[in-house]
Amino acid sequence: MIHSMSDVQSKDVGEGTNIWQFCVVLPNAKVGNECNICSHCLIENDVIIGHRVTVKSGVQLWDGVTIEDDVFIGPNVTFTNDIRPRSKHYPDKFLNTVVCKGASIGANATILPGIKIGEYAMVGAGSVVTKDVRANTIVVGNPAKEISK
């Protein structure tokens, strides 16, 4: 189901995926099967989303972001893709950020560019992730630090 009030330009949206109102999905984005893309989301061209992913409202997935299967992204999570952003000055290639299978990211977390969040890791709400997160761990705070394995 693609809501009539969304602008979904990609032809690569999987079966059983719901894209709710006021979303923009650019032409080269890939969205897997059985995903739930909630309202007010933006998915740029160089983005890959796996299967059974939930992206809550207010999330922007910029070029270079890969979301693997069974990931949960909470409301208003902020991804970044440029370590030194300047108006009208773009890198030749944006840094790649990968959220691995089964990981969860809490509401309002910020993920800096070039980060890998390991399988089944959990990022606490409001955390600022400045370095890779190991698989099966929980990180919280600013900067995010591991509290459990």
Image (tube, grey):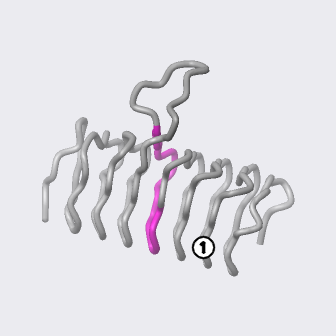
Q: Which of 97 and 73 is in front in this view?
A: 97
Magenta residues span 67-81
Q: Which of 41 and 116 is in front in this view?
A: 116
77 vs 33, left or right, is left
Q: Measured from the top left, where is residue 39 in percent x and y?
A: 68, 53
Q: Mark 1 points at which residue?
A: 32
Question: In terms of image quadrants, where is residue 82?
Answer: top left
What amino acid type should be assigned to the residue bearing mark 1? Gly
Q: Is residue 4 above or below residue 91?
A: below
Question: In terms of image quadrants, where is residue 117?
Answer: bottom left
**Which residue shows up at 64% across the image and 58% down it?**
38
Magenta region, mostly helix, strand or loop? loop
**Which residue shows up at 80% across the image and 62% down it?**
3
Q: In this view, does 20 lie above or below 45?
A: below
Q: Measured from the top left, where is residue 84 in percent x and y?
A: 41, 25
Q: Which of 134 and 109 is in front in this view?
A: 134
**Which residue shows up at 70% across the image and 70% down it?**
13
What is the quadrant of the N terminus in the image? bottom right
58 vs 13, left or right, is left
